[in-house]
Image (cartoon, grey):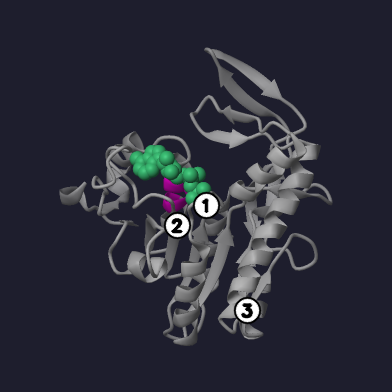
Amino acid sequence: MNAVRLNGDSLTGVVKIGGARGNSVTSLVRDMAERIRSGERWVLVHGASGYMEDLCRATEIEPVYVTSPSGYRSRFVGEKEMALFLAACGNYSLRITQEFGECGLWGLPLYPGPGTTAGASRKDVLRSQENGRVRLLRGNRSGTIVSFDTTPILRAWNAGAVPLLPPLAADEAGPDALNVDGDRMAAAAASALGADVLVILSNVPGLLRDGSDPDSVVDRAGLDEWDVLESYAKGNMKRKLLAAKEALLGGVPRSIIADSRVMDPLTSALSGRGTELCPTSMAAVV
Ligand code: ADP
């Protein structure tokens, strides 16, 4: 994945917002709109978990989650689940497009197909660690990003649009779309664009030393402190940390994990609230 360097001094960033309930997309879009009007360039990557849960409930499809032997939790995406996941992504993209419309901006969802951004390799078989044994689940329709083409994003910017990326990629080996992790999609986009910053917004104030204490946010840390950071992260936070690290290793100078539930969540994250991660050591503050 080769990074393109964009011309000009204006800040270029990628922001990811979770799809879970409690994430405030309205505040984010308003904040982004202000910043875009001042000349910054932003890509918005979104999750879809809240809409997916609603659709699973409405169709009485029980979501299946697995924890891999290396401790990462993910959703099994069979054929039925993929149909729902595409609908969930569409519902959220549409909502965000409408929010940008309210602010007088054009939010442009970029879906796999002609003009694809991410390409992924399919993980057909998921390994699930259950009671000390490993179970294999076949027919999975999710994948890991292996390539990222920035052309559709650059075109969208040139046309005056705000590129919106759902957590979907084109299967490198076939015609289908695959479900990919949104945090890692955002990291791939930020690296490929040569962005100045990756911001991952979620329903927590940042990386917490103690998951039950919202005042225990890690303010800043560097790649050298990663083992300590990983020891704090449980569940889905592990993947956010992985995404933050992938962006730093991909040449992005700042990855920030911050709260989406505050006023102006992007400006707040950029001005020091949340957990700022950078390539150099910050040993004194972990
Ligand atoms: P999103 O839907 O925004 O992508 P998730 O809910 O999947 O977000 O992941 C964030 C969750 O990670 C938090 O709600 C929290 O429950 C969990 N978590 C686990 N460990 C930590 C930690 N050390 N600091 C903050 N959150 C943590």
Of the two numbered discs 2 and 3 on the same chain, state the one appearing first in sequence. Answer: 3
Residue 241 in the magenta stretch? The answer is yes
Say if mark 2 contacts mark 3, CB within 8 Å: no
Q: Write down the region rendered in magenta.
A: 240-245
Q: Which residue is mark 1?
A: 183
Residue 8, position as x, y percentages in the image: 46, 86
Of the two numbered discs 3 and 1 on the same chain, state the one appearing first in sequence. Answer: 3
209 displayed left or right of 76: left
The residues bearing labels 2 and 1 have C-alpha atoms spaced at a distance of 7 Å
The residues bearing labels 2 and 3 have C-alpha atoms spaced at a distance of 23 Å
Q: Mark 3 or mark 1, which is nearer to you? A: 3
Q: Nearer the viewer, residue 209 or 261?
A: 261
The residues bearing labels 3 and 1 have C-alpha atoms spaced at a distance of 25 Å
Can you see residue 237? no
Of the two numbered discs 2 and 1 on the same chain, state the one appearing first in sequence. Answer: 1
Residue 110, position as x, y percentages in the image: 69, 66
| Numbered circle sitting on residue 101 | 3
Label 3 element class: helix
Looking at numbered disc 1 in the image, what kind of residue is underneath it? Asp
Looking at numbered disc 2 in the image, what kind of residue is underneath it? Ile
Ligand 1 has an atom within 8 Å of the beta carbon of the residue at disc 1 = yes
Say if mark 2 contacts mark 1, CB within 8 Å: yes
What residue sits 60% from the left and 82% below the top?
105
Q: Quadrant of the N terminus?
A: bottom right
Label 2 element class: strand
Ligand 1 has an atom within 8 Å of the beta carbon of the residue at disc 2 = yes
| Numbered circle sitting on residue 200 | 2
User: Local crowd at mark 3 within 10 Å, few (<14), some, or many (≥20)?
Assistant: few
